[in-house]
Amino acid sequence: MRSTEFFTLSASAKDRSRTGSEGIVRYLTIVGLTFLALVLALEPDVGFTAPLTMRVVFWTLQIATGLFVLQWVLNLITRRFGASCAPCWSLVLLSGLLGAVVLTPIYWLIGEGLMEGWLGYAAGADEESANGLGITVLHALIQEYLDIVGPVTTAWALICLPRLHWLMPPLLHGQTLHSETDRSPETSLAAPELSDRLDKSNTTSSPTPTRATWRERLPAEIGSDVIAVSSELQYLRVWTTRGCALILGALADVESETAENGLRVHRSWWVAAGHVVRVRRTATSAVCLMSDGREVPVSRRRRSQVIARFGDAAQYRVGVESKAVANTDLN
């Protein structure tokens, strides 16, 4: 019975992954068609003389290749650096800068190689004058990168902003709910958490799936003794006494589910009451000093509430684990 339930959970995880991939393709397709309509309406200079149909082909190749490469680079960067404390927006910007490097020779081949060289369309006046000056291929690629890096990075940031939770890989830190179902049956059935879940599912005739809470999304490696949580777009950066993780979630959920254990001190920050060492304030600002040495800003609107909850001299005995975290590169 347990093996049947395990394979059911594995199939469910695969279905979620497939649904996420379909959502990415659908979203990027809509974005691509929107960009295609925009460039055709604005009619920017393509660097060569060609009929409308070939300009459509040119922009379709450029936009489709650009979205594919940028999404691929974002996946690589997120899986490599997602476990660090780098903000989500920095990963997006970095993927734009590196994606432009990959796209530079591709765009150059589409324009100069395909349209001008192979199909024989005449180059524009600017490119003819540049060729007359003896510009080498290396110089041309450098100029191509300088021309596209700004628009590509800006456009990619705007594309990612509303749907970052789709475009970034969901398993940034090996979230337990998904990673358990990706293990082998022998390993998974030996885990107490999954065994308990399967036992509970066997006792009910029609189990109803529930949405995982933000605490359930925390990887087991960092524990559950939360110090502070910050909001980054559609993600939560969670610090514990054993490490740091980035998970999908909203700060409003943290505030509502753990109201008795902590307090939202800023629009983008929540702190655990047991880890507030003291509140330090000046005439214009205030910060919560946490057990791991972190300073969490307190907004002006919430300052009186924070002082009333923690006072000016909240005390907490800093444990060995918290000191170790404070000295790591997670800060």
Image: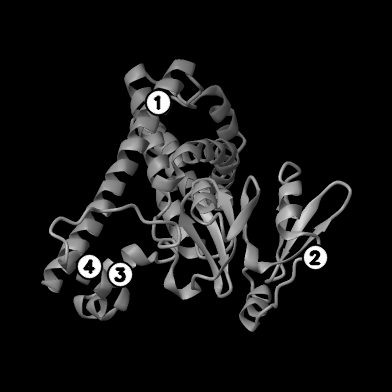
Disc 3 residue crowd, few under 14, some 14–19, many 20+, Cα 10 Å? many
The residue at the point 74 percent across, 71 percent down is: 315
Query: How far across and down, in percent of the image, does residue 151 sit?
Result: 56, 35
Task: Tell me: 76 left or right of 152.
Answer: left
Disc 4 residue crowd, few under 14, some 14–19, many 20+, Cα 10 Å? few
Residue at mark 4 = 200
Given this view, does label 3 or label 4 mark the residue nearer the observer?
A: 4
The residue at the point 42 percent across, 41 percent down is: 66
Tell whether label 1 touches label 3 (CB within 8 Å).
no
Q: Indicate the amino acid at tag 1.
A: Thr
* Residue 86 visible in the current orientation: no
Residue at mark 2 = 313
The residue at the point 40 percent across, 37 percent down is: 110
Q: Is 12 rendered above or below residue 283?
A: below
Q: Is 115 rendered above or below residue 278?
A: above
Residue at mark 1 = 34
Dot 1: element: helix
The residue at the point 64 percent across, 71 percent down is: 329
* Residue 230 visible in the current orientation: yes
Viewer-nearest residue: 78 or 55: 78
Disc 2 residue crowd, few under 14, some 14–19, many 20+, Cα 10 Å? few
Given this view, does label 4 or label 1 mark the residue nearer the observer?
A: 4
- First in residue order: circle 3 vs circle 2: 3
Dot 4: element: helix
Dot 3: element: helix
Residue at mark 3 = 180
Q: Indicate the amino acid at tag 3.
A: Glu
State how far apart marks 3 and 1 are (Cα): 39 Å
Given this view, does label 1 or label 2 mark the residue nearer the observer?
A: 2
